[in-house]
Image: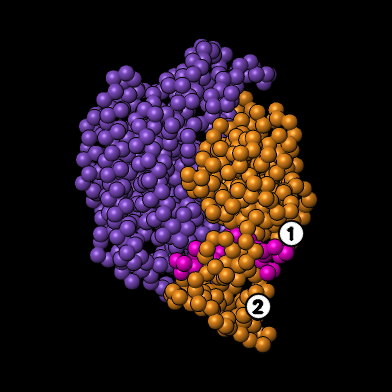
Chain colours: A purple, B orange
C-alpha cells in the first residue's frame, strides 16, 4: 500500500505528523494525525502544592498560558471551596477577554486570514501576513501590531508578566487595579472594539464580496463540512461566555444534547487512547466512540470558535450579536458545520471579547479593594473550566487535607478537536487524491486550510508570525522508497 | 548594529511550551536589527524550517543557535546533536534548555508511571480504556506501520546532551535580556564560554519592596495571608525565591504581590539552586530549637521539591528520583508490544 507522509517542518514537526495511506486503487484508505509528544503534567504535578498549579500548568503552553492559568485558578476555587468576591471575578474575566482578543488577532491575521485575503491559489511565499499587508495596505500591519502590543502590555500590567502570568489564587487574584490603570485598560479596550469592527468589515469586503474565488461556496463545500456535535460554554441566557458558565453541547442538527456544570464533565466526556498518538481523543460518553466518523451516532465533537457559536443561542454584547446574526443569515442558519466558517466565528468572538473587556473596565466594582477572599475550608477536590481560544479547557484536581495534589486530569483545548482534525485531514485528502492522482499544489494548501481552521495548538503549534506552515509530502512505495516529494516553504 | 557580513542564526524548540519563541518576538521592532545582522536559517515558529538543509550544512556553518526546550524524546535528542554539530555557538535559551524547567519535574517519575497516569488512571480514560492501550514507538495498523519518537524515562537539559557554550536564563527570558545577549553576540563581546549571560545579582536587589531584618517563625502558603503590598514577601512568611534567584526580570512577580518562583535560576557559582534556596531560608528561621525548626519546616514547606526545585530538578545534583535501571528507558519502550 502506498503511503504519503506529511511532515510539517514547523512546530508540527516536533508535535504533529500526518500519514495518508492509499489503497490498491490509489484512493485514500486512511489518514492518521500523530502527536509525537507528551510531557506528563498529570503525573508530575502530583505531590505539588495545589496553589502552584496556575504557575505550573501555564507552562503547558507559552502561547496561551493565560488559559491554563485561569482554568487552574478556577479549579482552585472549587478545590478550596471558596467563592471569589465580585471584583475578583470581574478582574479575571476582563483579563481573560483581553487575552482572547489578542490571541484571536494573531490567528486571524497571521494564520487563517492569508488564505482568504491573499487567495488560496496565491504563491505560498505571498500567502502570509506580509501578503495580507501587500494586499490591503501597511495601515493594517500597524493596527495588528498595536492590538497585539496593547494586549501583552495589559496582560503584564494586570497579571505580572507578559508570558506566564503569576496572579491567580484560590478566592481571587493577588492584586487589583488602580483607577489610573483602569482608564488605560478602558481606552485600549475601545481601540480593540474598533479593531474588531474593522476586522469584520475586512472579512466582508475581501471574503464575502469576493467574486474571483467564490469563498462562500468554498466555505459551504462538502470537503470542509463535518456534521459533528459542538461544545461551548454559555451563560445563564445560553449566550457565549469564555470565563464562566455551563458547558453546552448541541447535536449536528443544532438541538441540545447536554448542558452541564464542568464538575460533572466525566459523565459527558470520555477519552480514547490510540497506540499511534501520544494525544488522547475525547468523545461524548453518552453517545460513545464509533471511530473517526461524523453524525448524530458518533461521539466526536468539536470545540472551536464556530462550535461555541453553534452551541450558544447568541452573543452577550450588542455588536457581536449583530455580527453573529449576519454570519448565520449568510451561511443558511444554525448550526453551521462548515469548518472554514470557524475563521468568521473567530472574528465574531474577537469583537465580543473587546466589547466585554470594555464592559468590565467600566464596571464600578472593577477597581474595588475586595479582590481576594481567604479560603477557610479544608481543600478536597474540584473541577474548573474556561473556554480557551482553541476549545473548552478543563482542569480537575484532588488534594489531601493540606492541599497537596493527589489527582490531576486535564482536557486541553485542542485535544477536544483531535478526532475532528484527523477527519478533516482525511476528507481533504480524499477530495484531492483520486485513483493515485495527487493534485499537488492543491493538496498541500487544502490540507493546510483544513488544519488552520482549528488553530491547532499541539504544544502551541502554528502560532507563527508569517503564517506559513511548511509541509512536506512524501509519496512512498510500499517498501518505503520515496517516489515523489512535494513541498512548500521548504525548498 | 554591525556592518560585518551577515551571520547565520538558528532558533529551535525541543520539549518546551513555545513561550521562549514568543519572548523572542517581544523584542519588538528590534527583530529587524536581528534580521539585518543574520540570515535566519532555521526558526520553526516564525520562519522557514529547513531541517533537511541544516543536515546538508558543513559542520560549524551556523554562527549562533538559540536552543530552547529540554530533551525528552529521541527526536529532540537528534535535533540537539545536529544543531550542536552545525553551530559555532550554541546557547541554551531559557529555563528548559538550561535547567529542565517545569517539564523537568517529570524526573520525579519514569515513563511507565507517567503513561499509567495519563492513559490509565486519568479520570476520563477510566474505565473506558479497559484494554490498557498505550502509545507505542511502532504500531501496526491495517494500512501500514506508524511510528512515534521514543519517550525517554528522564528529561535532560541541553548540556546533559551536548556541549553548551552559553546560557540565557528565564522562563521565558525577558525581552531586554534577549536583546543584550544578541547584541553581545553580534558585537563579538561574549563572556568566556560556559557563562550565563545576565546579571549576577538577585531578584531581591531589584525588588521594590522594603526589607528589614528577616526573622520567620512561620511560613505561610500563598492562599493563607494577604501580604502587605510594600514589605518584603519573605519577611511576611511567604516563600519568595528572590533571595536565591538571578536578577534580570525587574522583580515582576513581587510587583503583583506574588512571590518570586525562581524562574531565572541560580547565580554564578551555585551548583544546586534548591540547596542554595534551602540554605537561604534556614538562615531566616527565627529559632535555635531543633524541634521547633523542624516543626516550622514541616508545616510550612510540605513540598520541598516543588518549592525549591520547581525549575531546576533536571539540572540539580539530584537530577531525578532514584530508579532501579540505567539508560534512558528506550530499550523498555521499544520492547513493549502494541496493544
**Nearest to the observer: residue A187 or residue B235:** A187
Question: Residue pushed farthest front?
Answer: B3
Screen quadrant of the N terminus of chain A: top right
Task: Estimate the x, y position of residue B31 in percent, counting from the top left.
Answer: 52, 43
Asked if A415 appears above or below A379 in the picture, the reply is above
Residue A184 occupies quadrant = bottom left
Q: The residue tagged with tag 1: helix, strand or loop?
A: loop
Task: Estimate the x, y position of residue A80 in percent, counting from the top left.
Answer: 44, 68
Q: Disc 2 or 1, which lies upstream in sequence?
A: 2
Residue beneath the point at 33% across and 71% down: A370
Residue B102 occupies quadrant = bottom right
- Structural distance between the alpha carbons of marks 2 and 1: 26 Å
Residue beneath the point at 50% across and 64% down: B253
Taking B84 as reference, is A403 left or right? left
> Magenta stretch?
B252-276
Residue beneath the point at 42% across and 29% down: A131
Residue beneath the point at 53% across and 78% down: B211
In the rendered picture of this protein, how many numbered marks are placed on residues?
A: 2
Looking at the image, can residue A312 be seen? no
Chain of the residue under the numbered disc 1 shown in the image:
B
Give the labeled residue for mark 1. Answer: B322
Asked if A371 appears above or below A216 in the picture, the reply is below
**Nearest to the observer: residue B79 or residue A447:** B79
In the rendering, which numbered label is found on residue B282? 2
Q: The residue tagged with tag 2: helix, strand or loop?
A: helix
Task: Estimate the x, y position of residue A302 in percent, counting from the top left.
Answer: 40, 38
Identify the main secondary structure in magenta.
Answer: loop
Taking B301 as reference, is A126 left or right? left
Screen quadrant of the C terminus of chain A: top right
Amino acid at each position: 500500500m502506498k503511503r504519503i507522509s506529511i511532515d510539517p517542518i514547523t512546530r508540527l514537526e516536533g508535535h504533529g505528523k500526518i500519514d495518508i495511506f492509499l489503497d490498491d486503487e490509489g484512493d485514500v484508505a486512511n489518514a492518521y494525525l500523530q502527536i509525537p509528544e507528551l510531557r506528563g503534567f498529570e503525573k508530575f504535578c502530583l505531590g505539588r502544592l495545589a496553589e502552584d498549579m496556575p504557575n505550573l500548568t501555564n507552562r503547558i503552553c507559552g502561547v496561551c498560558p493565560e488559559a491554563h492559568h485561569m482554568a487552574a485558578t478556577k479549579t482552585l476555587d472549587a478545590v478550596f471551596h471558596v467563592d471569589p468576591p465580585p471584583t475578583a471575578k470581574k478582574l479575571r474575566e476582563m483579563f481573560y477577554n483581553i487575552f482572547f482578543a489578542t490571541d484571536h488577532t494573531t490567528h486571524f491575521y497571521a494564520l487563517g486570514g492569508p488564505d482568504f485575503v491573499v487567495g488560496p491559489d496565491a504563491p505560498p511565499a505571498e500567502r502570509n501576513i506580509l501578503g495580507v499587508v501587500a494586499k490591503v495596505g501597511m495601515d493594517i500591519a500597524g493596527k495588528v501590531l498595536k492590538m497585539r502590543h496593547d494586549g501583552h502590555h495589559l496582560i503584564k500590567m494586570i497579571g505580572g508578566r507578559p508570558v506566564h502570568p503569576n496572579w491567580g489564587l484560590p478566592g481571587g487574584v493577588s492584586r487589583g487595579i488602580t483607577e489610573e490603570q483602569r482608564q488605560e485598560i478602558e481606552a485600549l479596550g475601545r481601540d480593540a472594539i474598533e479593531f474588531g469592527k474593522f476586522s469584520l468589515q475586512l472579512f466582508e469586503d475581501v471574503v464575502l464580496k469576493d467574486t474571483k474565488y467564490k469563498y462562500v461556496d468554498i466555505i459551504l463545500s462538502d470537503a470542509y463540512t463535518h456534521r459533528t456535535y459542538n461544545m461551548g460554554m454559555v451563560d445563564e441566557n445560553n449566550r457565549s461566555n469564555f470565563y464562566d458558565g455551563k458547558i453546552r453541547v448541541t447535536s449536528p442538527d443544532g438541538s441540545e444534547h447536554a448542558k452541564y456544570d464542568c464538575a460533572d464533565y466525566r459523565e459527558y466526556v470520555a477519552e480514547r487512547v490510540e497506540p499511534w498518538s501520544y494525544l488522547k481523543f475525547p468523545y461524548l460518553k453518552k453517545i460513545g466512540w464509533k471511530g473517526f466518523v461524523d453524525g448524530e451516532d458518533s461521539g466526536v465533537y468539536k470545540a472551536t470558535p464556530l462550535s461555541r457559536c453553534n452551541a450558544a443561542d447568541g452573543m452577550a454584547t450588542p455588536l457581536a450579536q449583530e455580527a453573529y446574526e449576519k454570519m448565520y443569515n449568510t451561511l443558511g442558519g444554525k448550526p453551521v458545520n462548515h469548518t472554514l466558517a470557524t475563521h468568521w466565528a473567530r472574528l465574531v468572538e474577537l469583537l465580543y471579547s473587546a466589547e466585554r473587556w470594555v464592559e468590565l473596565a467600566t464596571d464600578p466594582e472593577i477597581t474595588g479593594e475586595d479582590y481576594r477572599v481567604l479560603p477557610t475550608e479544608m481543600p478536597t477536590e474540584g473541577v474548573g473550566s474556561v473556554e480557551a481560544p482553541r476549545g473548552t479547557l478543563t482542569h480537575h484536581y484532588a488534594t489531601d487535607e493540606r492541599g497537596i495534589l493527589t489527582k490531576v486530569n486535564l482536557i486541553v483545548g485542542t485535544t477536544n478537536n483531535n478526532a475532528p482534525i484527523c477527519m478533516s485531514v482525511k476528507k481533504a485528502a480524499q477530495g484531492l487524491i483520486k485513483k493515485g492522482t495527487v493534485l499537488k499544489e492543491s493538496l498541500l494548501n487544502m490540507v493546510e486550510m483544513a488544519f488552520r481552521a482549528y488553530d491547532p495548538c499541539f504544544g502551541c503549534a502554528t502560532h507563527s508570525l508569517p503564517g506559513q506552515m511548511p509541509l512536506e509530502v512524501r509519496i512512498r512505495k510500499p517498501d518505503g522508497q520515496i517516489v515523489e516529494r512535494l513541498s512548500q516553504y521548504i525548498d | 548594529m554591525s556592518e560585518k557580513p551577515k551571520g547565520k542564526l538558528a532558533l529551535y524548540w525541543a520539549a518546551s511550551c513555545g513561550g521562549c519563541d514568543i519572548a523572542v518576538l517581544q523584542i519588538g521592532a528590534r527583530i529587524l536589527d536581528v534580521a539585518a545582522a543574520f540570515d535566519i536559517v532555521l526558526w520553526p515558529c516564525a520562519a522557514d524550517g529547513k531541517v533537511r538543509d541544516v543536515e546538508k550544512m558543513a559542520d560549524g556553518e551556523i554562527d549562533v543557535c538559540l536552543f530552547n526546550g529540554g530533551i525528552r524524546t529521541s527526536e529532540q535528542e537528534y535535533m540537539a546533536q545536529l544543531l550542536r554539530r552545525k553551530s559555532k555557538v550554541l546557547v541554551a535559551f531559557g529555563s528548559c534548555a538550561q535547567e529542565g524547567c517545569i517539564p523537568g519535574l517529570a524526573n520525579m517519575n519514569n515513563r511507565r508511571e507517567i503513561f499509567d497516569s495519563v492513559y490509565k488512571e486519568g479520570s476520563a480514560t477510566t474505565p473506558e480504556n479497559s484494554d490498557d492501550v498505550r502509545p507505542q514507538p511502532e504500531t501496526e495498523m491495517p494500512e501500514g506501520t506508524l511510528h512515534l519518537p521514543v519517550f525517554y524515562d528522564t528529561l535532560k537539559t541541553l548540556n546533559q546532551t551536548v556541549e553548551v557554550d552559553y546560557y540565557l536564563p528565564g522562563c521565558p527570558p525577558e525581552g531586554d535580556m534577549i536583546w543584550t545577549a544578541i547584541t553581545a553576540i553580534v558585537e563579538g563581546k561574549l563572556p568566556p564560554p560556559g557563562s550565563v549571560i545576565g546579571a549576577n545579582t538577585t531578584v531581591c536587589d531589584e525588588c521594590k519592596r522594603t526589607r528589614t531584618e528577616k526573622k520567620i517563625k512561620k511560613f505561610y502558603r500563598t492562599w493563607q495571608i494577604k501580604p502587605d503590598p510594600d514589605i518584603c514577601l519573605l519577611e511576611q512568611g511567604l516563600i519568595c525565591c528572590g533571595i536565591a534567584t538571578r536578577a534580570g526580570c525587574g522583580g515582576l512577580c513581587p510587583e503583583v504581590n506574588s512571590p518570586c518562583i525562581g524562574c531565572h535560576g541560580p547565580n554564578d557559582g551555585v551548583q544546586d539552586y534548591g540547596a542554595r534556596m534551602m540554605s537561604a531560608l534556614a538562615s531566616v528561621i527565627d529559632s535555635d530549637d531543633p524541634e521547633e525548626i523542624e516543626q516550622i519546616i514541616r508545616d510550612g514547606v510540605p513540598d520541598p521539591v516543588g518549592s525549591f526545585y520547581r525549575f531546576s530538578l533536571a539540572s540539580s545534583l539530584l537530577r531525578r528520583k532514584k530508579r532501579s535501571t540505567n539508560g534512558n528507558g528506550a530499550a523498555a519502550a521499544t520492547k513493549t508490544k502494541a496493544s
